[in-house]
Amino acid sequence: MAAESDRATTLLGRAALVTGAGSDGMGRAIARAFAHAGADIAIHYHGAPDGAATLAAELGRRVHAIEADFADPRSARGAVRQAIRELGKLDILVSNAAVLLRKPFLETTDAEWQNVHAINLHAYFAAGQEAARHMIGNGGGRIVFISSINQWRPNAGLAAYGAAKGGVMQLARTMALELAPHRITVNLIAPGTIETDFNRAALADPAYRKMKQALIPAARIGTPDDVAAAALYLAGDAAAYVTGSTVTVDGGLSL
């Protein structure tokens, strides 16, 4: 049993890039979990240098901070290449960086739509493709896309966001199909309501928090650590035969 536990949790000798780890949210929690499991880490951030520097200092191990604006897919590719240079290789990619637009469909502009899709979908494609090309030559790897239950569950006001997440789901499944012969797994995590910078202000309203909790069978708002636990599983050896799957982390909300 001890051997199985070790196999499920250790990332010793692995090199990982976690995007969107500069703010206090899921990327940050995933980077912490991976570092504590023994991985060397590159953390991507945009516009939050203090947060990235604080996290790197906290982890106290081989950690590299990489700044990039994923609105430009060339920057997403560049971040992957920089991580490979800094770490010497890349075994794990977690694409987490995203933006949230809450706006009615009829009021969403072309520019807003394009920005959401550039960061929430095109950057996942660009970073995933760059990482996969390296992993093929490196004997395999793990790619984890942080999606959302909105990849299949529509919400009013989230037309651009939900459409991008639906695209991420199909992208990941197709990548999983094509990359399986190269020993690369590609999986998704679909969080529900998680206490992150995206929605912390809204959840500070007691009435809103009570309403959201009432929708969740588990009767609590999720934490970034809940998502990090799923990412740690998918990145490890215990999930070697899991690909093209979505791990839903929502306390039963999508039920």
Image: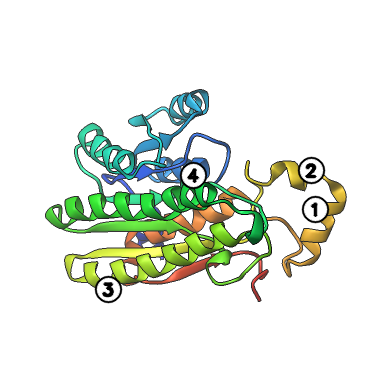
Q: Amino acid at mark 3?
A: Leu
* Tags 1 and 4 touching, CB below 8 Å: no
Real-space CA distance between mark 1 and mark 3, rounded to the nearest whole angstrom: 39 Å
Q: Is the residue 237 above or below the residue 77 in the image? A: below
Instruction: For the C terminus, give its image quadrant.
Output: bottom right
- What is the quadrant of residue 196 in the picture? top right
Between 89 and 200, the one nearer to me in the picture: 200
Cβ–Cβ under 8 Å for marks 2 and 1: yes
Q: Which residue is mark 2?
A: 204
Q: Is residue 10 visible?
A: no
Q: Would you name the residue on which mark 4 appears?
A: 27
Residue occupied by mark 1: 209
Q: Secondary structure at mark 2?
A: loop
Packing grade of label 4 (10 A; few <14, some 14-19, many >=20) is many
Give me the residue at 47% from left, 29% from top.
52
Instruction: Give the residue at the far bottom of this rendering.
Output: 255
Q: Secondary structure at mark 4?
A: helix
| Location of residue 90 in the rendering, given as x and y in whole percent from the top left corner | 25, 46
Q: Which mark is on residue 177?
A: 3
**Crowding at mark 1 (Cα within 10 Å: few <14, some 14-19, many 20+):** some
* Between discs 1 and 3, the one toward the N terminus: 3
**Type of residue at label 4?**
Gly
8 relative to 20, above or below: below
Lower position in the chain sequence, tag 4 or tag 2: 4
Q: Position of residue 157 (x, y in %)?
A: 67, 59
